Image: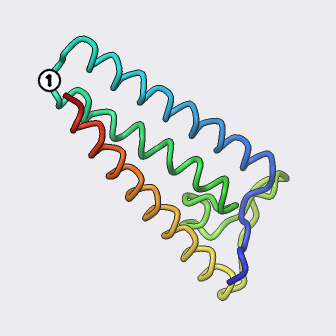
Amino acid sequence: MARIANIGLAERRKRHRAGIAALAIGLLVVLAAWRMDLHVAVRAASAALFFVGFVGIFQARAHTCVALASRGVRDMDEGPERIDDAGELAALRAQSRRVLVQSLVATVLLMAAVIALP
């Protein structure tokens, strides 16, 4: 299946950088909570950061912005424009769902490791 992009190179780079930053902050939270022997719930709270991080990275990789796809819009680095082709929009929304599912699965797997820390 061919990939349909709704974000350009600059937008992909922004999402990738934001994703890496969110994952790094989440990791710092987990390590700090673990080192200070805080309750596991504090480590579990990092799940939101990990999810945001994975969404950013997977959006960049898929050339697909979830928020823009939900609104039927693309931004190929020249500003937002509406997507009028129903087939293209349907394919883009399917890609968007895959990004969210991949992000959720990655977050759950990472959180299983985080929760298992002694």
Q: Residue furthest left?
A: 39
Task: Look at the image and tell me in which quarter the C terminus lies.
Answer: top left
**Residue, x 24% and y 11% (percent of image)?**
36
Q: Position of residue 21 (x, y in %)?
A: 56, 30
Q: Where on the picture, by quarter, is residue 38?
A: top left
The image quarter containing residue 46 is top left
Residue 102 placement, left or right of 37: right
Q: Which residue: 33% across, 26% down?
A: 30
Q: Residue at x 50, y 48 (%)?
A: 54
Q: Residue furthest right?
A: 78
Q: Give the x, y percent position of residue 79.
A: 79, 53
Q: Residue at x 66, y 57 (%)?
A: 61
Answer left or right for 105 relative to 68: left
Asked whether 77 or 45 is in front, the reply is: 45
Of the residues shown, which amino acid type is indicated by label 1? His
Q: In this view, does 1 lie above or below 116?
A: below
Q: Looking at the picture, how far across and down is residue 24, in whole percent?
A: 50, 28
Secondary structure, mark 1, is loop
Q: In the rendered image, which residue does mark 1 sit on?
A: 39
Q: Which of these two is toward me, 112 or 16? A: 112
Label 1: few (<14), some or many (≥20) within 10 Å? few
Residue furthest toward the bottom?
87
Query: Which colour scheme appears in the figure?
Result: rainbow
